[in-house]
Image (cartoon, rainbow, N blue to C red):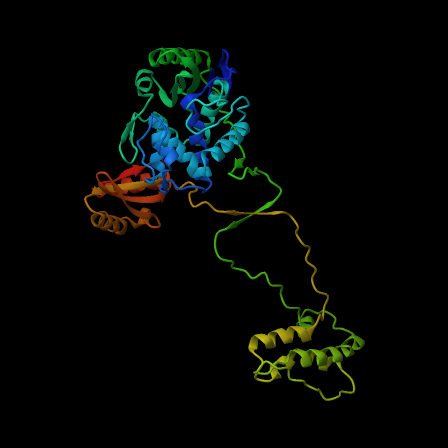
Amino acid sequence: MVMDARTGEVLHSRNADTRLHPASLTKMMTLYIVFEAVKHGELDLDQKIRISKKAAAEPPSKLGLRAGQRIALRYLIRAAAVKSANDAATALGEAVSGSEAAFARRMNRTAKALGMSRTTFKNAHGLTESGHLSTARDMTTLGRHLFYDYPEYYNLFSRRSTDAGIKAVYNTNRRFLAAYRGADGIKTGYTRAAGFNLVSSAQRGEERIIATMFGGSSTAARNKRVAELLDMGFKRAPTRAAVRKPRPPAYVGNAGTKVAEGATGKTIRLVTAVSKSMRPLPRPTLAIAANLEVEPPSESAAASLKTTIQDALQEAIVVADGSTAVVTPEPRPEVTKAETIEASQIAEILPPAVRPDEKEAIKETLLLAAVTPEVHEIDDTPVIVTKISNTSEKFWGVNVGNYASRYAAERALLKTALRELATLDGTDRKAVKTSKGFEANFTGMSREAAELACRRLAARNTECSVISPS
């Protein structure tokens, strides 16, 4: 299958809908879902993932993880994308969904949402399993979505080597990346059942082509054929074309519940503490009503307050020991308008045993409704409560050096933060332990902020390098 990535137009296909073993092309979907999980706050790139016995026991290619070991999510992503490590892929699936079986179900839901109609996943790594099948068309579609839906991670697939936490790993596609001009990804795959598979993308000028091949007889034969397919694509694709990005699927979490764009429910974002009480406002007094030029109740209505006020006083007054004090008001021949207004001040002469908050409650009871209360319509629109992800677009950071001890790294972080408050204020300072010592990192930044910080620090002769999200 050959596709113009800009428009999604198919430039060439042959047996593109034949269901075959995808091998490690499967990890494209594994990584797509992990990127989705990070974006929506299910996981964090620096989160430590505990390796299960199942993940540690996966056959090669593997990173060499041990059961019970903990490793940052970002290193598992690098190992799966660059080295195609099966133990890392299984660990990623378990981190997202709790088990590989549950993760496979999420993979299939996501594949369906992407339009991969002839793909069925059974595991996170792509090792041969009955029913674990895909097509060249579906994998080309997935490769295009990876490029457009998560461009901040796409650079992973072009790295010839990378640090995977416990060791450096080398790209399984490095020969093709070095040999073909403009190639920058995406993923290789091999098993005996599948043969040599490759989804590759290359850009020349404004043109970007994606080519997919299943079933090569060797690495060399596969690379040669994919190079021919890409050449065909660049020859057939127009020089200029309007980019029509594919539409990302609706977010489907582990529960399988879609949250589509334009949903009818309202979304309440829990950002901070409640700043406004939802308690209804007290009803206005007659004095307020007079100021608002609202007509007070008639004399007959005012007279009906007499019994109500007496009953309220008798029930509401509570003495210090918790018993009820019965109050018998003196008989009054009649209730005038002035006396009705005066009822709003009765709570101020209650016995000292009544607490201030009880006085206010009694006062509201006595005032009753002097004007017609405002009627509020009840909004019965379904409400969806979500949690704001703390990741948003701030995946980037800066490194200001490697140090022999945590103390030295933290000291450097503090000195640098004080020196460069303009760009580093509000970032997270982290002394990250590596095999070479401790990295002094500032994280939680946008790409622009990270690049600006490094430029400013470099101007002060301070070591600085930008940390990408992956």
Q: For this view, does 166 lie left or right of residue 11?
A: left
Q: For this view, does 178 lie left or right of residue 35?
A: left
Residue nearest the observer in this picture, 462 or 189: 189
The percent position of residue 27, horizontal first and vertical second, equals 42, 27
The percent position of residue 364, horizontal first and vertical second, equals 65, 73
User: What residue occupies the far right of the structure in this picture?
Assistant: 300
The quadrant holding residue 197 is: top left
Residue 227, above or below 73: above
The percent position of residue 390, horizontal first and vertical second, equals 43, 46
Identify the residue at image location x=59%, y=39%. Answer: 262
The quadrant holding residue 343 is: bottom right
Q: Quarter holding the C terminus?
A: top left
Residue 453 in sight from this viewpoint: yes
Q: How many marks?
A: 0
Residue 172, above or below 97: above
Residue nearest the observer in this picture, 401 or 251: 251
Q: For this view, does 309 lie left or right of residue 463?
A: right
Residue 6 in sight from this viewpoint: no
The percent position of residue 39, horizontal first and vertical second, equals 45, 39
Identify the residue at image location x=78%, y=77%. Answer: 304
Residue nearest the observer in this picture, 124 or 330: 124
Identify the residue at image location x=31%, y=45%. Answer: 442
Residue nearest the observer in this picture, 158 or 344: 158
User: What residue occupies the far bottom of the structure in this picture?
Assistant: 330
Identify the residue at image location x=73%, y=77%. Answer: 308
Residue 224, above or below 326: above
